[in-house]
Amino acid sequence: MRRTGMKAGTIAIAAVMGSVVLTGCGGDSEPQSDGKSSAASGKAQEREQGTKAVRAAYDRTAEAESARMKVRTQLAADGRTVTSEGEGVLDLAEGDSVMTITAEGESLEQRVVDQMLYQKAPGQKTQGGKPWIKIDLEKVAAQQGVGNQQFGDPAQTAAFARAITDKDVTEVGTEKIDGVDTTHYRVSVDVAELPGGDRMREQLGPTLPMQVWLDDEGRLRRQQIDMTVKNTASASAKPGDGSAPQQLKMSTVMQFTDFGTDVDAEAPPAGQVTDMTDKALQGSGRQS
């Protein structure tokens, strides 16, 4: 069961970071003035428009209420790389989801309900004989220094918008995604301006790089983040002592289609669930 817990913890980390990316694309659609608009060139005006579009993207997407989502996450640490792929449906307002996740040749049924991550692997049970495991994403996020308030709460996305200026958004060009015309932007978020930014800066560095692809209605069709997460708690750890890696490289791509699709995310019966939050926390290198 140790392997199951490790894998669950790894995927949980991906799910948590995925939530950061999703909520990092807007919420406050009003751009901040840089005081130079009167002398702005055509290129500067285009950049300002791009900034406004990126800031408004989450609100535009959330207006659809739900979507079908595909996720591909690649985690690399200590010379080992794990790739997971997921497909399912997502409640864009609440953050609840129902997905099937495939990693290392195994498929998991996954649900996120009220910031609780539930997973079930076919034919596999916990030590207590229960088919489902549960991980509290808020606790994992808090331990990683990301901040609970940034998960599943659209009201908090304004913090990300305030951390983006016209200098941080670059229009790359136009691309088709699943046959839909999109505009591709590169975005750099000032980590220090985010809630819990000091801790996040230690782990992520000064900026959070993202790429987003927006359709003609300003909704997210794809978003990508490539980051290196430093585990500051394991700075003094020795190789091979069983602690978490000092550095984790992660690449996550999320793609959205079928806006307005039905989402029926319900928690499994409590009697079928084993709480694995503590093991997930220990797996990230800090004892609870």
Image (cartoon, rainbow, N blue to C red):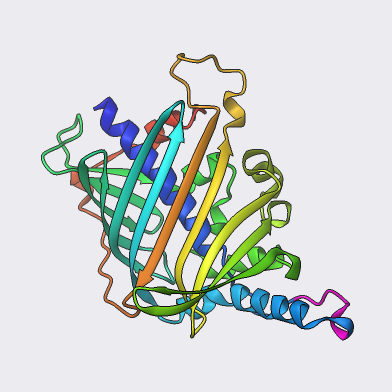
**Does residue 151 appear in this view?**
no
Q: Position of residue 101 (x, y in %)?
A: 27, 50
Seen at 49% across and 85% down, the residue is 217
Decide which of 279, 92 is in the foreground and name it. 92
Q: Is residue 74 above or below residue 81?
A: below
Q: Quadrant of residue 166?
A: bottom right
Q: Is residue 212 above or below residue 279?
A: below
Q: Quadrant of residue 30?
A: bottom right
Q: Position of residue 59 (x, y in %)?
A: 53, 77
Task: Give the main secondary structure, helix, strand or loop, of the magenta stretch.
Answer: loop
Q: Position of residue 218 (x, y in %)?
A: 52, 81
Q: Is residue 49 above or below residue 225?
A: below
| 234 sits left or right of 80 in the view | right
> Is-magenta flag for residue 44?
no
Decide which of 182, 110 is in the foreground and name it. 182
| 203 sits left or right of 9 in the view | right
Seen at 68% across and 51% down, the residue is 207
Question: Start and end of the magenta stretch?
Answer: 32-38
Seen at 34% across and 50% down, the residue is 117
**Does residue 271 appear in this view?**
yes
| 163 sits left or right of 74 in the view | right
Decide which of 26, 172 is in the foreground and name it. 172
Seen at 63% across and 63% down, the residue is 187
Q: Position of residue 150 (x, y in %)?
A: 55, 58
Query: Which quadrant of the figure contains the N terminus?
Result: top left
